Image (cartoon, grey):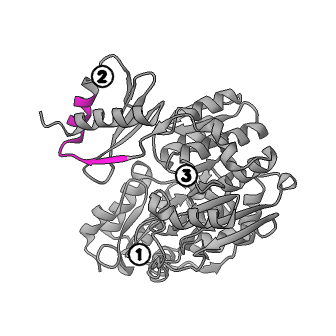
Amino acid sequence: MADLDALDVIFKAYDVRGTVPDQLDAELSHRIGAAFARFVTTTGGGADRVVVGRDMRPSGVELAAAFAEGVQRQGLDVVDVGLCSTDLLYFASGRLDAPGAMFTASHNPAEYNGVKLCLAGARPIGQDTGLAEIKGLARAGVDTPATSPGRVEQLDLLDEFAEHVRSFVDTSALTPLKVVADTANGMGGLVVPRVFATLPFELEVLYGELDGTFPNHPADPIQPENLRDLQARVRETGADVGLAFDGDADRVFLVDDRGEPLSGSTTTAIVAKSVLEKEPGATILYNLICSKAVPEVIEENGGVPVRTRVGHSFIKAVMAETGAAFGGEHSAHYYFRDNYRADSGCIAALMVLEQICKAGVPLSSLRKPFDRYAASGEINTRVDDAQAVIERVAAAYPDAHQDRLDGLTVDNGDWWFNLRPSNTEPLLRLNLEAPTREACDRHVAEVRALITDKG
């Protein structure tokens, strides 16, 4: 078995993730399954079954089976939904009102695997809302067999999920478009064609074969180099839109008809406008590294913008508190109240396509009112003492508006930045926005000099 000390490495802020088999193997997965079963029987009303799904990584077959056995030995039934995207697993958790476990390492390389856990109704589990307790139970070991082990039921929810995704748009308003989807050999190759099957779009899938070794390129669309094949294909075929999904297909980045990528902020703003057309006056969430254009668009369209910390557990909690209809992250996670407050790349993609159809203009034109500022992207710097650096940077801007909602945000009026420590590494993450590219680059150099200043 992988060393129990590996639990401290693989339990992250929001999920479990590590290399297989040295950090995560079948025996450790079995222990985590038993621990999760014990946790959910005493939390949230006492569960009697757990939904388990997995992505296409070869190690997922053994890991998911071992986890399921750990759950069963605690007397809980297992609903095995098989190969699925993470948003399908969340849908299953909401639809069946049961806790869930999705075996995936998302965008990480092939040697990784992990598990995303949720409570019944797709309610999030994070470090402070159960993960720490589950880790403790896994370390101690709780695999005392129940008198009567649970059963396993196989359940295919793909068609029902596809219908659910389509329910977020007015399908009668959709017009023919050519769409290229790069699913990067990930779960989008299974889910996206089923969602698009009844829609008036011509869909071409790049790298649709499910292959967890990622033979074509990493399933990490936030990295520009992983968009190149999609951009080239959109330009080559004259497609209207390109969609780039990550490995477990819960995130999507869009490419316009000219092959130019949209930021997660731009997509958030477009989807927010769509939501507000359907639900005037709705509350819309955006995380604090989103462009200032996002709250501006929300207000211009009659909505109520609410700023949140980065991370799904925080956004889902605020969504529950406020009743927000939608929330977006710059990292291309898009959350929908009517999707059990869970994120879905497919839903967001369809809502943008609906906006293109309704506007009757190409995405390269549609995006212009939403692209208002120049952004740095996330810049990571390794530091010895993150908090000391944050305080030094804060002291350099005494006249700016500052807050500590998540790291340090400094707003200088016409430009702003956020500096946050990584949850898992000795890194500081800088995101900065300014009116022009020249101003953005200048201010990035200024702030980075403060970060790296050794005094």
Q: Residues within 10 Å of mark 1 (few under 14, many from 20)?
A: many
Q: Is residue 242 above or below residue 128?
A: below
**Of 255 and 100, the residue lying toward us:** 255
Where does the image place residue 117, in percent across and percent down from the top left? 49, 61
CB within 8 Å, label 3 to label 1: no
List the residue tagged with mark 1: 110
- Which stretch is magenta? 379-393
Residue type indicated by callout 1: Ala
List the residue tagged with mark 3: 333
Q: Describe the element under mark 2 as helix, strand or loop.
A: loop
Instruction: Give the residue drawn at x 45%, y 24%.
Output: 414
* 55 relative to 16 in the view: left or right: right
**Of 407 and 240, the residue lying toward us:** 240
Residue 397 marker: 2
* 453 relative to 56 in the view: left or right: left
**Of 72 and 173, the residue lying toward us:** 173
